[in-house]
Structures are given as structure tokens and as C-alpha cells.
Amino acid sequence: MRTSELPFEKCESLDERTDYVFSEQVGHLLRKAYQWHMSIFQDLSCEPNLTAPQFVALCTIQEMGSCSITDIVKATAVDQATMRGVVERLKSKEWINLSEDPNDRRKVVIQLSESGADLVARMVPCAKEVTEATLGNLNPAERVALIYLLKKMVQS
């Protein structure tokens, strides 16, 4: 479908074009909130060489016991290419172990190493502080509302 065939009308008036303030748009605000949250994660992390996507992957692996990259992608909504890089970095830091699936040699099985499990245990209190700092300016009702609305937005 060409742009001219899309089911929306082009802005007709100058007023309509100037009413759009990008800094008030949901995508921009979500991006800023995410960047702020990631900065807080780096500041409060008890492991300076751990990124938030790596921590999410470690938590997912811990929760699943053993899994594939595809399983982690589905659970975390991190894209496949990014997750491959995350898994390689986790492996190089010896926080995970990779092995072949005995039933399908093409499939790689991922499990937490002992040091990875220890790291997750140390990081959970830090992660709780990150959440608290991220939500710090919100009262209890706003916190519940934000979490509810974010979950509602991403439901499939």
C-alpha cells in the first residue's frame, strides 16, 4: 500500500501541524523514562560489568532452569540479534553454561553457572532499589496505576 492510499488524512491546516509537540508524545516519554531507568540501573547495580538486558536474561534463565535463546527472547521481548550478543557476553563472563540439547544437536541449552546464580542472588536487592528509585517520585496509587497501564499497553 502506498502512502497516498493509507486510511488517514494529511494535515490540512497550520494549526494541526503545530499542535504536535514531540516531547509530549508517548513514544518520546517512554524512551526518556527507559533511558532514565537504565541510568539508575547502572548507578545502583552491585556488579558494574552487568547491564540491565544481561540481568533480565540471567533472571529468565534462572526462572526457566534451562532454556534456549528463543525462550529468552519470548520471555523478555529483547530481539534475537541483541539476545545472541547478550548470551555471548554472559558466557564470556562465565555466568552461564551452554551445552547441546541431547534431543536436537542444533539447539543450544543455556543454564546459569554457579557464579551466575550467585550474581542473581546478589543483584536482586539492587534491582529492588532500582525499581524504588525509578518509581521514587510516584505515590502508591500512581505506582499501581503506572504498572497496570504499562501491562495493559503490552498485552498481546
Image (cartoon, rainbow, N blue to C red):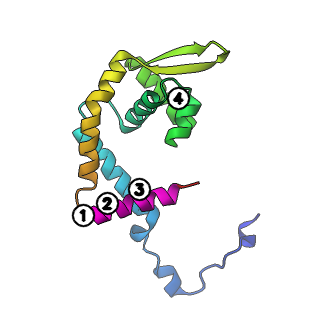
Kind of residue at disc 2: Arg
> Which callout, 4 or 1, points to the residue nearer the camera?
1
C-beta proximity under 8 Å, tags 3 and 1: no
Residue at 39 percent of width and 57 percent of height: 147
Name the residue tied to disc 3. Answer: 31
Residue at 31 percent of width and 65 percent of height: 142
- Separation (CA) of disc 3 from disc 1: 22 Å
Vertical arrangement, residue 73 with respect to residue 150, above or below: above
C-beta proximity under 8 Å, tags 4 and 3: no
- Separation (CA) of disc 4 from disc 3: 23 Å
C-beta proximity under 8 Å, tags 2 and 3: no
| Image: magenta residue range | 138-154
Q: Position of residue 24 (x, y in %)?
A: 40, 70
Q: Earlier in the sequence, mark 2 or mark 3?
A: 3
Secondary structure under tag 1 reads loop
| Left or right of 116 in this view: 20 | right
- Separation (CA) of disc 2 from disc 1: 6 Å
- Separation (CA) of disc 4 from disc 1: 38 Å
- Checking the image for residue 84, the label placed there is 4
Image-quadrant location for residue 73? top right
> Which callout, 3 or 1, points to the residue nearer the camera?
1
Vertical arrangement, residue 90 with respect to residue 139, above or below: above
- Checking the image for residue 14, the label placed there is none
Secondary structure under tag 2 reads helix
Kind of residue at disc 3: Arg
Q: Earlier in the sequence, mark 3 or mark 1?
A: 3
Image-quadrant location for residue 149? bottom left
The reply to whether residue 48 is in sight is no
Name the residue tied to disc 1. Answer: 139
Name the residue tied to disc 2. Answer: 143
C-beta proximity under 8 Å, tags 2 and 1: yes
Between 80 and 11, the residue placed more toward the observer is 80
